[in-house]
Amino acid sequence: MRGLKRTYALPAETLELFEMKVLRGKRSSVISKLVREWLDEQRREQLRADVIEGCRDMAEIDLEIEREYHPLEEEVERVLGSD
């Protein structure tokens, strides 16, 4: 895949440390990997938040169903429990 060039400003100390640690020919691939990992983590966090919200929404529906059918469960228990 062909890369695109972009310009971003980073703190000088961060760049100096990065350039000391990562060889010249590897820098783009390291940055690409780090950005991809960050984007994946953001996606996972959003999915996690969506699942939690969905569970909260379903909890209210489940409680409504429980309230609707609970009297029937009690009637079944009363009838079957009396044998």
Image (cartoon, helix red, strand yellow):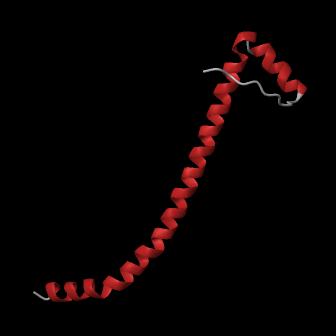
Location of residue 38 (image quadrant): top right
Quadrant position of the N terminus in the picture: top right
Quadrant position of the C terminus in the picture: bottom left
Measuring 45% from the left and 69% from the top, which residue is drawn there? 58
Measuring 55% from the left and 57% from the top, which residue is drawn there? 50
Tell whether 32 sits left or right of 83: right
Tell whether 42 sits left or right of 11: left
Q: Position of residue 82 (x, y in %)?
A: 14, 89
Label total for image: 0
Front residue of 75/19: it is 19
Location of residue 2 (image quadrant): top right
Measuring 83% from the left and 30% from the top, which residue is drawn there? 8
Location of residue 34 (image quadrant): top right
Front residue of 21/50: it is 50
Looking at this view, name the residue that lies furthest to the right: 12
Tell whether 47 sits left or right of 65: right
Measuring 21% from the left and 84% from the top, which residue is drawn there? 77
Q: Position of residue 46 (x, y in %)?
A: 59, 51
- Up the image or down, 44 lies above or below 23; here it is below
Q: Position of residue 68 (x, y in %)?
A: 35, 85
Q: Position of residue 79 (x, y in %)?
A: 16, 88
Tell whether 54 sits left or right of 76: right
- Up the image or down, 18 lies above or below 47; here it is above
